[in-house]
Structure formats: structure tokens, C-alpha cells
Amino acid sequence: MADYASEKGIKVQTVAGDPPAPFEGQVWYNSSTGSHRVNKGALVSAWSTGGDLNTGRGYAAGAGTQTAALGFGGFAPPSTGATESYDGTSWTEVNDLNTARMVLAGAGTQTAALGFGGNADPAPITAATESWNGTNWTEVNDLNTARQQLAGAGTNTAALAFGGNSPPTTGATESWNGTNWTEVNDLNTARNVLAGAGTQTAALGFGGYPPPGTSTATELWNGTNWTEVNNLNTGRDKLGAAGTSTAALGFGGYKSPADRGETETWNGTNWTEVGDLITARRGLGGAGTQTAALGFGRWPTGPNSITEEWSETGGNQSIASS
């Protein structure tokens, strides 16, 4: 069997990062990340149309992946507990949340999700937390700070809740251990209708509305503290999110005077503008990864059942080491 050096005419190089101009198919070892990498050709990224929600709405929460997602809650109107499962093609109605609400946060997977906070319009802002087992929602212990318009990250047994409006606008952060919420250190910039990605111990919070205006602020959570890092290129609130603290995607949202379609990718250091949503909108739910994401729903105008799928192929990607 021919080896890499025989086929390509060079050995696998060790580079502290990525080569400046790798050729298509070139493999190298990135000593900074401890991974083998390959150039898979020109980077192609775009949004495409997915299957419509059965219950059109905005301000729903999301969990899971692009081909195995869960969308729940939102404002139809009125506030709804509707929960739907996405298989990469279409949405299927499943069992509702126990507490119908909008502007809540979510975390987890399609079969093991967590929904928390929100506004059970016309009832008060809620601290209610519910756990999803793939079939039913079960009420579990409440947040310490009842709030709406918050962000979430993590799983249904190890989650993070941050920001929101209680009122007032807050930077409160809470950690979930599968049983209880514990108050931890606040965001540096208190804000609501922000986006979140990542895990309980490595999360990213970005955008949002810290009165009196829309924010570009991005903060990184290390399990103990939030640190301010490089800003979004386009400040906005009510945006969707997917991914991790080192590889995130932020999309859509609102910046006066209009809904936005901008999409930005985060590489752990900086945000880069990429292709816009097909339909500019705010109040959309998000799920998935930086390279395979889902954006669904919309508020307040136009068709609010629309779903779009983000795909990114090519470019420099990590590969499994043998």
C-alpha cells in the first residue's frame, strides 16, 4: 500500500497551527491543537431551505443536531408548549411542555433535553425547569432566579443558564447538575435576548440587549468566570446559535431598524462573517454545530414556520488520528 509521502511527494509536516496555503488533500499535524488536519478544498458554506415547523412560532428553544433536533415552546401566539422533533427533513409533533412559554432557553439533545425559564404569557416570568426523556417532559427543580430572554448551554444533566430579564436585565449565571441549579459568577455585561453555545464548563455568550442598545459583546465561560473576548462584527439581539465555545455559529437577530440575516463563525478567537440566512429574521431557535446548524421559526412578521439548514464543507478540517 502506498503511503502519504509516496503519493504526495512530501511527508506529513508538523506545524504550530495550519500551513498558510495548503494544497487540496494535504495532511499535516497541528502541534498547537494536537490533531491531524487536512485541506478538503475550497470552503463552501450556505443556508438552504429545510422542512417547515408544524406550529409556526418565534422565540422557541432548541436542542440537538441538524438531523436530530428538538424545538420547544415559543410564541405562536399565544405562548405554546408545542414540541417538535426534526429528522433532517421534516418536523414531527411530540408531547408538549407542561408549562407553555416563550423566550425560554434550552440545552441537550433530541432525546435528552432541558428547557428552563421563559415567559408563560399572560402568567408571570417563570423559573420552571423541565427535563425531556425522548417521550415526555417532567418538571424538575426551578432556577434560583426566575427570568425570560435568557441563554443556555450544555446537556440535560450538566447545563448553564445565563443572562435574561427578571426584571431587570441580569447577568445571573446558574449551573445545573441534573438535580439542582446553583448560582455562580455573573456575566460581565448583564443582558437579555442573547445567544449561547457550548457546555456547562466551556460556554460562549454573545450579542443581546444590555439597555439602552444592542450589543456586540462576546464572553467566554471557563467553568468559574466569564471573560470578555473579541466582539461580533454585527451587534444584534434575538439571534440564533449553534456549536461550542471554540467553534460557534451566530445567525439572524435584530438590529434597529430591521431584522438581520448575517451569519458569523467563531474560531475560539475571532468572529468571521459568512453567508446570510435566506430570510432575515429575529426570534429564531437554533441547534447543531458550527458546520451543520439549524435555524427555525421567526417573529413577529412573515411566515414563522420556516426552517433553514446551514452546511459548511471543505477548508481545513481535523481528522481522526490513527
Image (tube, rainbow, N blue to C red):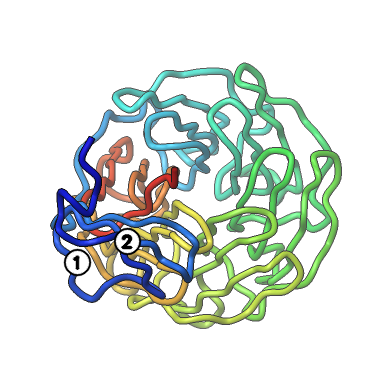
> On the picture, is 320 further left or further right than 186?
left
Q: Describe the element under mark 2 as helix, strand or loop.
A: strand
* Residue 295 % position (x, y): 35, 45
Write the residue at 23% across / 64% down.
274
Q: Is residue 45 visible?
A: no
> On the picture, is 260 further left or further right than 171?
left
| Residue 101 picture quarter | top right
Q: Is residue 293 above or below residue 219?
A: above
Circle on res. 127: none
Reading the image, the residue beneath label 2 is 28
**Dot 1 surroundings within 10 Å: few (below 14), some, or many (20 or more)?**
some
**Dot 2 surroundings within 10 Å: few (below 14), some, or many (20 or more)?**
many
> On the picture, is 15 further left or further right than 273?
right
Quadrant where the image shows the N terminus: top left
Write the residue at 36% across / 41% down.
296
Amino acid beneath label 1 = Pro
Quick one: 172 or 128, which is closer to the camera?
172
Quick one: 217 or 150, which is closer to the camera?
217
Q: Is residue 37 visible?
A: yes
Reading the image, the residue beneath label 1 is 22
Between label 2 and label 1, give the one nearer the viewer: 2
* Residue 59 % position (x, y): 48, 47
Write the residue at 81% across / 34% down.
140
- Contact between labelled residues 1 and 2, with CB atoms less than 8 Å apart: yes
Q: Describe the element under mark 1 as helix, strand or loop.
A: loop
Q: Is residue 227 above or below residue 201?
A: below
Amino acid beneath label 2 = Trp
* Residue 156 % position (x, y): 68, 38
> Rounded to the nearest whole Å, what is the CA distance between mark 2 and mark 1?
9 Å
Write the residue at 28% across / 41% down.
309
